[in-house]
Image: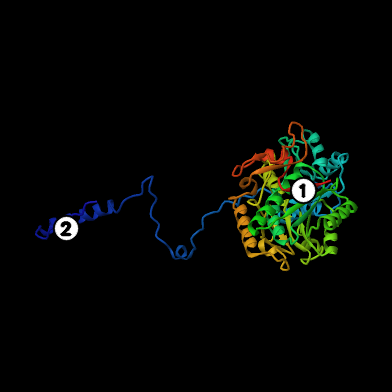
């Protein structure tokens, strides 16, 4: 719009006419008209000023998919109550179920090889989608039904057989790491220089665990400048309370051992150690803190196995719709967080509810240099920086177990040099000889 300016020097009549024309022009162009792309501007009213601004409309929250329902079933080869092996597996199942609201734990006890598959079918019918055999001799038959149940994850402890399938997992914890720490303590405890082991029978699993203990004893003895002997006598079975008692008594009476441990499953060796007033080193569980067996007057230290670390690997894989690795062999570098927030390693030394160096009995006369070495090696293994089987050479004692294609190496043979890490396959299936320095009794 153009504004016309009227000059006052015009004649009056002409000025009047011009003013009339100007008024008509102003009326005709009284402001911009709205176009198709521009809405007329609306003056705010009081009602509009008082009306709260509209909030942006939120899309309905996306519902989180329900967690997959998992039922963990464990077939225990023995009874649960009063045992450290099956007791630890049972505790693991309960701890997994306590942590995850979508996981249920069910089980069967005293399962032999002939009943493994029938019980497994029952457990699957009850909803089990993870089925475990907690010993190799009765867990291996699960492989025979793995193809029949492709959506079920099966698993079995390893003794020496490494048979696997995509849904048949084999596993074992690196217990030898905690046994090494026990060996350091045992070397410090003995006054006679004689340590006794009540053992089940020669097998890769037993030999491997005894090797961890042996290396610990030897390192502890070297540090303290002591001459320490290890005597091993076999029972011929995992669980034979009468025979285990007799062997324990023989080791004390004839070989003057004053520190006793075992690679068998009954409580008889502990009973004998208590009666004789000598030190006992425990296995599989914190027997004082968990079961109230004996006291720290007799039990110097135990190692505790947390099978839940391994079971959690299977549960986590199933939750993600994946398959875990078919061979699981975790050590102290792997952990599981309990429902209460406690973080635990796969294996550790324990006693009366205490963990680590604090677990050594307060009654035990263990020099500070041994405690310091226990603390150092434990921390290094938890960080994955050190391992006794890598650090030490493996020199054959000339005794052990003949395997097909793997005879026992002659005494004095260095099978593995120090600083070299043995393969998982070799440790789990080929370690068939005792380490030099052990006396195997007939």
Nearest to the observer: residue 263 or residue 290: 263
Percent x, y of residue 395? 68, 42
Q: Is residue 57 visible?
A: yes
Q: At 64% across and 44% down in the image, what residue appears?
A: 393
Crowding around mark 1 (Cα neighbors within 10 Å: few <14, some 14 to 19, many 20+) is some
Q: At 78% across and 67% down in the image, what residue appears?
A: 297
Percent x, y of residue 212? 70, 49
Percent x, y of residue 157? 76, 43
Element type at mark 2: helix
The vertical placement of 158 against 12, above or below, is above
Nearest to the observer: residue 46 or residue 109: 109
Disc 1: which residue: 439
Percent x, y of residue 411? 72, 40
Disc 2: which residue: 16
Q: Is residue 46 rendered to the left or right of residue 146?
A: left
Residue found at the far bottom of this picture:
363
Nearest to the observer: residue 356 or residue 401: 401
Count of numbered labels shown in the rendering: 2
Q: At 65% across and 59% down in the image, what residue appears?
A: 224
Nearest to the observer: residue 60 or residue 352: 352
Q: CA distance from mark 2 to mark 1?
A: 137 Å
Residue 294: quarter of image = bottom right
Element type at mark 1: strand
The answer to whether marks 2 and 1 mark residues whose Cβ atoms lie closer than 8 Å is no
């Amino acid at each position: 719009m153009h504004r016309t300016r009227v000059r006052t020097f015009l004649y009056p009549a002409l000025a009047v006419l011009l003013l009339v024309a100007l008024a008509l022009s102003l009326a005709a162009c009284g402001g911009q008209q709205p176009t198709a792309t521009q809405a007329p501007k609306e003056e705010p009213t009081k009602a509009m000023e008082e009306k709260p601004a509209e909030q942006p409309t939120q899309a309905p929250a996306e519902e989180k998919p329900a967690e997959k329902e998992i039922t963990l079933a464990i077939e225990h080869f023995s009874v649960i109550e009063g045992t450290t092996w099956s007791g630890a597996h049972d505790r693991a199942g309960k701890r997994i179920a306590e942590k995850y609201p979508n996981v249920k734990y069910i089980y069967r006890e005293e399962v032999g090889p002939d009943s493994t598959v029938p019980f497994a079918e029952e457990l699957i019918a009850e909803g089990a989608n993870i089925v475990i055999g907690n010993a190799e001799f009765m867990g291996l038959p699960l492989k025979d039904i793995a193809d029949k149940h492709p959506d079920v994850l099966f698993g079995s402890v390893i003794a020496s057989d490494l048979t696997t399938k995509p849904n048949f997992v084999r596993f074992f914890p690196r217990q030898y790491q905690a046994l090494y720490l026990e060996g350091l303590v045992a070397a410090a405890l003995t006054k006679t220089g004689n340590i006794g082991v009540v053992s089940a029978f020669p097998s890769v699993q037993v030999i491997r665990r005894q090797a961890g203990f042996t290396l610990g004893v030897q390192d502890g003895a070297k540090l303290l400048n002591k001459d320490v002997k290890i005597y091993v006598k076999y029972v011929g079975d995992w669980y034979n309370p009468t025979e285990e008692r007799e062997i324990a008594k023989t080791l004390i009476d004839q070989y003057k051992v004053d520190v006793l441990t075992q690679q068998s499953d009954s409580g008889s060796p502990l009973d004998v150690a208590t009666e004789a007033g000598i030190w006992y080193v425990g296995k599989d569980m914190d027997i004082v803190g968990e079961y109230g067996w004996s006291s720290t007057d007799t039990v110097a230290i135990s190692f505790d196995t947390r099978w839940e670390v391994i079971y959690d690997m299977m549960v986590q894989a199933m939750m993600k719709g994946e398959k875990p690795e078919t061979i699981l062999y975790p050590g102290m570098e792997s952990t599981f967080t309990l429902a209460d927030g406690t973080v635990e390693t796969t294996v550790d030394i324990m006693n009366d509810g205490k963990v680590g160096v604090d677990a050594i009995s307060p009654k035990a006369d263990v020099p500070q240099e041994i405690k310091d070495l226990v603390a150092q090696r434990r921390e290094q293994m938890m960080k994955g920086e050190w391992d006794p089987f890598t650090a030490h050479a493996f020199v054959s004692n000339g005794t052990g177990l003949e395997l097909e294609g793997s005879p026992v190496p002659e005494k004095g043979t260095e099978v593995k040099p120090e600083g070299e890490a043995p393969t998982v396959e070799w440790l789990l299936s080929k370690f068939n000889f005792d380490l030099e320095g052990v006396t195997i009794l007939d």
